[in-house]
Image (spheres, coloured by chain):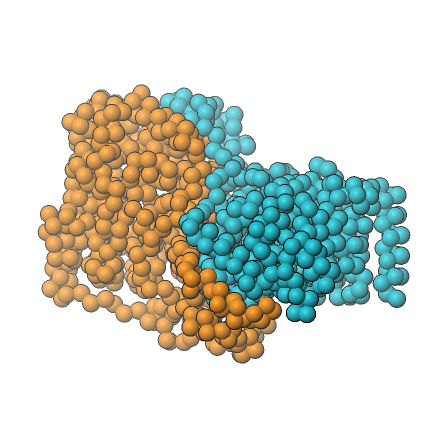
Chain colours: A cyan, B orange
Amino acid sequence: MARRGKKPGKQRQGRGIRQLPWQDIVNIYPPMEILSSDQLESIHEASLTLLENIGMCVMHEGARVLLAGAGAEVNHATAMVRFDRHMLMEKVALAPSQVTLHARNPAKNFKLGGNHLSFASVGGPAYCTDMDRGRRRGSFAECCDYLRLVQSLDIIHHEGGGPFETIELPAETRHLDLYHAQVRLLDKNWQANALGRERSRDAIRMAGISMGMSTDELAQKPALLAIINTNSPLQLDRPMAEGLIEMSGAGQVVCITPFTLAGAMAPVTLAGALAQQNAEVLAGIALAQAVRPGSPVMYGAFTSNVDMRTGSPAFGTPEYSKAAQASGQLARRYGIPLRSSSVTSANVVDAQSTYESAMSLWAAITGGAHFIMHAAGWLEGGLTASFEKLIVDAEMLQMMSEYLKPIVVTDETLALDAIAEAGAGGHFFGVEHTLSRYQTAFYQPMLAYQQNFENWQEAGSVDTQRRANRIWKQLLKDYQQPPLDPAIDEELSAYVARRKRELQV
Amino acid sequence: MARRGKKPGKQRQGRGIRQLPWQDIVNIYPPMEILSSDQLESIHEASLTLLENIGMCVMHEGARVLLAGAGAEVNHATAMVRFDRHMLMEKVALAPSQVTLHARNPAKNFKLGGNHLSFASVGGPAYCTDMDRGRRRGSFAECCDYLRLVQSLDIIHHEGGGPFETIELPAETRHLDLYHAQVRLLDKNWQANALGRERSRDAIRMAGISMGMSTDELAQKPALLAIINTNSPLQLDRPMAEGLIEMSGAGQVVCITPFTLAGAMAPVTLAGALAQQNAEVLAGIALAQAVRPGSPVMYGAFTSNVDMRTGSPAFGTPEYSKAAQASGQLARRYGIPLRSSSVTSANVVDAQSTYESAMSLWAAITGGAHFIMHAAGWLEGGLTASFEKLIVDAEMLQMMSEYLKPIVVTDETLALDAIAEAGAGGHFFGVEHTLSRYQTAFYQPMLAYQQNFENWQEAGSVDTQRRANRIWKQLLKDYQQPPLDPAIDEELSAYVARRKRELQV
């Protein structure tokens, strides 16, 4: 234990990276409540008033027909849909408060809602970056490497829908290559791209094939999560409406996420931005319930603010943190699982990238979020997926998972006998109570360097970004592709080939 | 507002660094409670049992005499002092729950306790570091520069007792030079060095001179805070006991801070480490109340854990975060203001330094801490004060102060009219509700770069550490020494000269 004088061991080479095992993270701490109950009700009421008086522009006719059938007041000429508050709340009440997302490896199923917390890797950036090759349009091979890393990091429950766009592949069929890679390279849950009907249906079908399930069976055991972004303010466009209808129709999870950027697509005041976010989420949930009563949904909270000098989006701000926690109170009011995110505006994996990510991550988790999207890898306001940031974030997620393990208070852990044994002015290194526990007592970092400056300097003064670079390379070396039934792989290949022919016509 | 296309302005030069104004930070959010009330009581009871059965080794005879007079059971031969739990809690109940710390500029007084939150700069490291000159033993001139920066950063309420040791000055009288510089270069509150009687008395006398107050007047308007570290486990050494007796005797604030490093100086289990921390704090508070009933104290929480591979202290760990929040529950149980810290083991101002600091800062603040020691500048587990970290941390503190400003929910901020004006699918840039508010609506960062990658690259790809380097240099350029009555300065100089003669004999 007391090995202060001992020369530190070198970073392990080729023997795998130490990390926490896959886990069901449970958060039993009471959530932060930064709104009073009166304030919460005022925001709730304001959002209902918005949906009653202004309504939502729903650009997809089929969606409007479904909402009219559910009792909404529809004007097909203007595409505006207005919601009576009682009808709205009845629909919202149909949504389940908890759902299990299934993976092709059942050991990697996880729960959304209740007191469960799960983490997703970054999804959707245009670019990728790493220390060696810089910022660039990433190739499909590089995308596959990123997926391998997401598979390797056990703290990540869900692959976030493709780390970056691979523009070398044709836009019409790119999603097929991605889904195929997600199934092959991961045995954990992955995100569907719900932009339009084709991409959604392909995801549903390929998830079904990968798990040996019919579409009906898949509806009983949802395996897909899709983000449905409203086109704020108060608008749902055609491709997202199509995605919602396909996904909810198939009983898969839709996460309604307005991009309510205060000062641009939402009021400059947080209360107004939250009221608008809430209105858009509730309208989306009502549509999902009109499609298929009881279909699983998530409350997607993404309210942030613009940078006042440039009008650009700013992330990981104090306003973002407050909005994330207030959103938790709103989601709990409706009993809907909450999605939040870990975000930053920074352009490089430096101190800013971390303090902004920490600002959003801490706020989200202490605010009671159930699912953290972009929890690992996000950089540049979501424009870039970083290989090094993936590792830095994974460490932060591991630390949060340890923070959420409650302090155990028993006679053994209160350790009065051990304190008596050490004695006033003594130490605990040699005490049996210490010796029997020290190997597992504390979090062992994957990335942090906890030795002193002299050792650090002697080892080459390697900073955190560079250590992260070494770790992802080691993880790639150690990666083992999870086994997939050859018959399933063959069926997937045939499906992809057929669909490519159809879509490229 | 919508200036996305506009070329970004260059970093201001010579026109001052944008920062938040000096403020009384109020935290009205309900604190995180990670222990159940039963667990809290178990830790409390265990600490009382420790003090009843084992007691505390108090190495200073005068302190033992005071405690015997207060009803403790003293064995002068072994130096052990045992505390009856009723006597102990009666003494603890004498301590005030809130106190104002006075500065020589009364506009910079601040409150400890209640729902007030204050931030202190790093105190006590052996080394200093910056990007230009590297890690080194710092000179007195460099120490003065650091003090000038602490004065310049309005988010810092309290100078933490000298940023680093200046070993070029004689050890016996170094504190006099430091106190003199603290009075001259700062008009805000500063920390005393309470290691022994001489340093404590000099601080009290020089604080009195600087504020034109007698020692009796100073006792009514405390201006000094001193950290009293117990020598864990369960031991109070002579110099710290002397400091406590002098400071509490003069009605100044003592912060009893055990260094309960789980696995080394405290049990390897957090519950035990907290029970021991609590016992040591309560014993220290009882001594302060025996010295002077009603004298102001703080509950100093510093429990962390060792790194299990090396036995070195680890900081900003998940265990640290849990201990900080549990300590908040203990301090609130006794109605004592809580000191926590912002800490990291990192050796350089990189991602690790920030995620560990954020881990401790978020935990402390959401856990209800009143005073964050080492809140800006700490590096290397407290061995080094960093010029760049000072700036990075100041930004994080500013962000936390903004996060603590509650969301305003009124008809105006709910902005239903503005949402109607923008309309479905519209935007808020030109809406009057936005235009009249956008200049002050959101936090404007001091350090974070919120523009896109292309602008960042064009501006030289300057990372956060380098931007922090530029900011502290600009702050030093812009520094203006706060005026000090020449008669007071003369009296201080004479005092320092006389005391140097006395102490160097």
Q: Is residue B29 left or right of residue A398?
A: left
Residue found 45% across the figure and 28% down from its top: A409
Q: Residue furthest bottom?
A: B6
Q: Is residue B310 above or below residue B456?
A: above
Residue found 75% across the figure and 54% down from its top: A246
Residue A423 lies, in percent from the top left, at 36, 25
Q: Is residue A446 left or right of residue B339?
A: right
Residue A11 lies, in percent from the top left, at 60, 45
For residue B481, what is the image quadrant? Answer: bottom left
Residue B162 lies, in percent from the top left, at 30, 53
Residue found 56% across the figure and 60% down from its top: A52
Q: Is residue A472 above or below residue B421?
A: above
Residue B97 lies, in percent from the top left, at 26, 42
**Closest to the observer: A269 or A85?**
A85
Q: Is residue A74 left or right of residue B230?
A: right
Q: Is residue B212 above or below residue B301?
A: below
For residue A9, what is the image quadrant? Answer: top right
Q: Is residue A229 something one can see in this rendering?
A: yes
**Closest to the observer: A252 or B363?**
A252
**Closest to the observer: B361 or A387?**
B361
